[in-house]
Amino acid sequence: QVQLVESGGGLVQAGGSLRLSCVASGRAANSNAMGWFRQAPGKDREFVASIYLNSGRTYYMDSLKTRFTISRDNAKNTIYLEMNSLKPEDTAVYYCGAGRSIVATRERSNYDYWGQGTRVTVSS
């Protein structure tokens, strides 16, 4: 059964914007927190942003907090990642994760479910 589905990636010029979406279904829809991670070619998957679904509390990679915004729509079991002023170094596959009882949302190993990823390419 499908748990997490990301969408919204694509090719954009530097300085542009994209909004990613992640829809949760099945058991993933009962998560307490969801987050976005990204993986650039040849690099490890890294934390981008996360949100607790009840409180709305958010966390960000420090270097991204001025350009990226995570939000949620609990009625739609969906989280979003608004990305502005995109740079070529933002090029990566962006993954959505969800967990049933996450305490530390920056840790990849704490997530129970992952989507297939959506590719973001920023051209210079």
Image (spheres, rainbow, N blue to C red):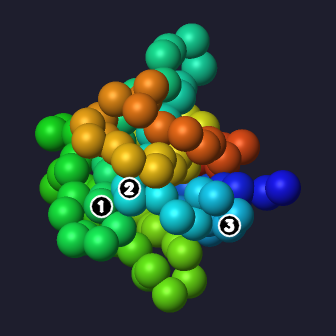
The amino acid type of the residue labelled 3 equals Ser
Q: Which residue is mark 1?
A: 52
Which of pointers 3 and 1 lies earlier in the amino acid sequence? 3
Q: Which residue is mark 2?
A: 33
Kind of element beneath mark 3: loop
In the image, what residue occupies the spot 70% across and 64% down?
Answer: 26
Closest to the observer: 114 or 99?
99
Using the numbered discs, state the Cα–Cα distance from disc 2 to disc 3 in whole angstroms.
14 Å
Q: Are marks 2 and 1 in contact (CB under 8 Å)?
A: yes
Which of pointers 2 and 3 lies earlier in the amino acid sequence? 3
Q: Position of residue 2 (x, y in %)?
A: 79, 57
In the image, what residue occupies the spot 22% across and 59% down?
Answer: 58
Kind of element beneath mark 1: strand
In the image, what residue occupies the spot 26% across and 37% down?
Answer: 104
The amino acid type of the residue labelled 1 equals Tyr
Number of the label disc, if any, that sits on residue 25: 3
Instruction: Please tell me how crowded label 3 is: few (under 14), some (14-19), or many (20+) other residues with Cα within 10 Å.
Output: some
Q: Position of residue 3 (x, y in %)?
A: 70, 56
Instruction: Please tell me how crowded label 2 is: few (under 14), some (14-19), or many (20+) other residues with Cα within 10 Å.
Output: many
Closest to the observer: 100 or 115?
100
Farthest top residue in view:
42
